[in-house]
Amino acid sequence: MDFGFIDQLWVARVPLLKGLGVSVSISLLSIVVGTVLGVFVGLALTYGYRPVKWLVRGYTDFIRGTPVLVLVLASYYVLSTVGIDLGPFQAGVLALAVFCSSHVGELVRGALQSIPKGQTEAAKAIGLTFPQTFAYVLGPQALRQALPAWVNTAAEMVKASTLLSIIGVGELLLRTQEVISRTFMSLEFYFFAGFLYFVINYGIERFGRYVERKTAVPS
Amino acid sequence: MTSLLEIRDLHKRYGTVEVLKGVDCSMRQGEVISIIGSSGSGKTTMLRCINMLEEFQGGTIAIDGQEIGYETADGVRRRKPEREIARQRALTGMAFQQFNLFPHMTAAANVMLGLVKVKKMSRDEARALAEKWLDRVGLLSRKDHYPGQLSGGQQQRVAIARAIAMNPKLMLFDEVTSALDPELVNEVLQVIKALAEDGMSMLIVTHEMRFAYEVSSRVIFMNQGRIGEEGNPREMFLKPKTERLAEFLKTSAFN
């Protein structure tokens, strides 16, 4: 009896697809939550009052200086010791979202600070309030500025989602390893998993390029 | 008759450096005042205090009798609420040296933004008004262009249209031709001249002495944070009373 790779792939299709679904969910959730959080982090870093700024600066520096794996492990094992009992999926997404937020926060800060001061002054001069200035003048410009780096961060999050296999989240990598332990076709299945990650990230990149093109300002 | 602009004993410090050391100035409706002086004399700072782009530590500025930026109650001077300051800023319009157009918006959208968001006009109303003013500065055909697609002179004209469309009581021009190539200066000055002829009240900080001479009803010479001399342009440029002004005019390109 000869079980070729294609046959084994067919046999393993359900766990692999489920794993892929979990990986995509982890990535999507952590990117969305991390980005929303990150925008607030960026705003605090740019416009916050000093104590707020220092606090948030401490948060981002600490998070960015910590390996993601450590964050994942801490989120799962340490939080439960202080009474916050999260499942592996929740704990993992939390860790990745926090990690993502510190990076997005820096992106947002950088983008906002790169906008010339004259933009704010011109907006003030026509009587816009600060929230209006942000919504119509600074925000749209910062968004365009931050987009390429944000796509990069999003792709990093997809890759970081594999770390959740360590705490037993059944995402694509863990499922792949399980299939390999049954079939011993490590090369083929790792390659296949790698291909799937590539497809996801390629999709994100194409999407980013598309948005970049759509929002490009003619000059 | 109350004056349009009333500046009393204006003091402005950056840290310990005092850049405005007590400026008094009053201006009537329809006046065109040029402010000249060497760099660092405080002329741009004074202009920026009028629309609260700069805070000031002493004195008062009033437009149409309304005190700008600060209020004094029980002897305590307080900054007005931001919302109120934003509203007061719309009393004046400002054009900047670096144009400061919003690069992600078309010329028309630049002009419309304040009309829609501050004046609460409908988009159709705002568009009609924006097109009217873009036409007045000769750029109606460029209304759908982005700032990056316009020359410096064209950008500055759009910026002036953006400010004027808000129907300010007073226009502030902050060295609007200083960043322009020499051949583009004139188109901008022509626009300002036309506004002067319409009776717009204007304060113009400029290095274009010939233009100041021709367009102003009054000239103010700023010197080291104070008004060094003021008067009508003919007297100021042809028969300066103070030595400082005479010296300044000699080194500037007026001849």
Image (spheres, grey):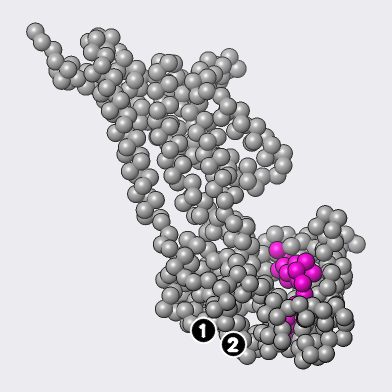
Residue at 36% over, 27% down: A23
Label 2: which secondary element: helix
Queried whether the magenta region covers residue B37, the answer comes back as: yes
State left or right for residue B221 relative to residue A130. right
Residue at 59% over, 60% down: A119
- Can you identify the residue that label 1 sits on? B136
Q: Is residue B203 above or below residue B53?
A: below
Q: Is residue B13 above or below residue A34?
A: below
Q: Residues within 10 Å of mark 1 (few under 14, many from 20)?
A: some
Q: Which mark is residue B194?
A: 2
Residue at 61% over, 31% down: A61
Which chain contains the residue that carries disc 1?
A: B
Q: Where on the picture, by quarter, is residue A131?
A: bottom right
Q: Which residues are magenta?
A: B31-53
Residue at 40% over, 28% down: A159
Q: Residue B1 in the image: state x and y as whole percent.
A: 80, 88
Q: Residue B82 in the image: state x and y as whole percent.
A: 70, 59
The foreground one among B85 and B20 is B20
Question: Label 2 near label 1: C-beta < 8 Å?
Answer: yes
Q: Where on the picture, by quarter, is residue A137?
A: bottom right
Q: Amino acid at mark 2?
A: Ala
Q: Is residue A208 above or below residue B169?
A: above
Q: Residue A136 in the image: state x and y as whole percent.
A: 52, 59
